[in-house]
Image (cartoon, helix red, strand yellow):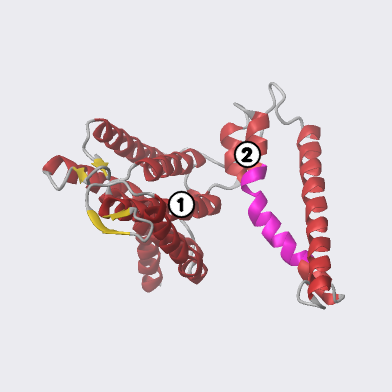
Amino acid sequence: MKDTFSTYHPAVNFLYFTLILVFSMFFMHPVCLATSLLSALCYSIYLNGKKALFFNLKYMLPLLIITALINPAFNHEGGTILTYLRDGNPLTLESITYGIAAAVMLITVISWFSCYNAVMTSDKFVYLFGRIIPALSLILSMALRFVPHFKAQIKVVSDAQKCIGRDVSNGSILQRAKHGIRILSIMVTWALENAIETADSMKSRGYGLPGRTAFSIYRFDKRDKKAMLFLSLCGIYIILGAFLGGIYWRYFPTMKGVGFELYPISLYICYFALCIMPVVINVNEDRKWKAIQSKI
């Protein structure tokens, strides 16, 4: 499916992911954690389909369980003691709950970053920050796209090595290790050469020089203005609510926080609207497209 939200202006995309990632890392209220996690999973599945679903079940779910189990094994704070471990340390309800919350926060941020990489391309990042911080924006752009490019290139190299019998699946354990080291050496060389070629290419084009102009396909239209206004209002309202304690939650020494009063509920609704915004936009556009097709 086509992601309509990625066709918005880069400033809108960047502001959205900045707000979402910051809020996901700092808001530990259970409602906020659940809202951000479900929205991140929905958007990642919309962007990548079955591949994202498989990745979440294969990697994110075990990571959630492991992280949730590790915390109470080392963290023994909390006033609600459930039992005592063999070493005499208490197992508390608060440490278990905080472990689950920390695990949810971790996989939520990872899921949002996967969506960020799919939407915020290197061209968009350079467009936004190329004139303000040209050198840093180029470095960050190269760093953000390094993993997907490295993954694609290592598949090409592995397939080529496999054709001549030098893949990690060929030979004895020692031979496989040698083949793996050879592939890794090739990839390191490729990465260094690619970085140098990119830097030389950008320098030859006058990138970062004063007065340099650049062609851009991005235009800030009425749709982007409405989205920017919505993001700004939601962001300001949620930030003010956080400072006023509207989404306060603590885990130690005992769990305590705001519940479902009128003001916190309004913050939960606003936060949910902010998180689910790309999915709503995409679903609405898909519905319009299907309606147009049915009339043909």
Q: Nearer the viewer, residue 7 or 66?
A: 66
Residue 265, given in percent of the width and then of the height, sits at: 17, 46
Residue 197, given in percent of the width and then of the height, sits at: 81, 43
Residue type highlighted by circle 1: Trp
In the displayed image of the protein, which residue is found farthest to the left?
A: 261
User: Is 214 positioned to the left or the right of 185 in the image?
Assistant: left
Residue 26, given in percent of the width and then of the height, sits at: 37, 40
Task: Name which quarter of the figure residue 134 lies in.
Answer: top right
Q: Residue at x 41, y 40 (%)?
A: 22
The residue identified by callout 1 is 112
Q: Residue at x 34, y 35 (%)?
A: 232
Query: Quick check: 149 above or below 249?
Result: below
Q: Which residues are magenta?
A: 142-157
Residue type highlighted by circle 2: Leu
The residue identified by callout 2 is 140
For label 1, the crowd category at 10 Å Cα-Cα, with few meaning under 14, some 14 to 19 and many 20 or more, is: many
Q: Which mark is residue 286?
A: none
- For the C terminus, which image quadrant? bottom left
Residue 19, given in percent of the width and then of the height, sits at: 40, 40
- Secondary element at tag 1: helix
Q: Residue at x 78, y 56 (%)?
A: 187
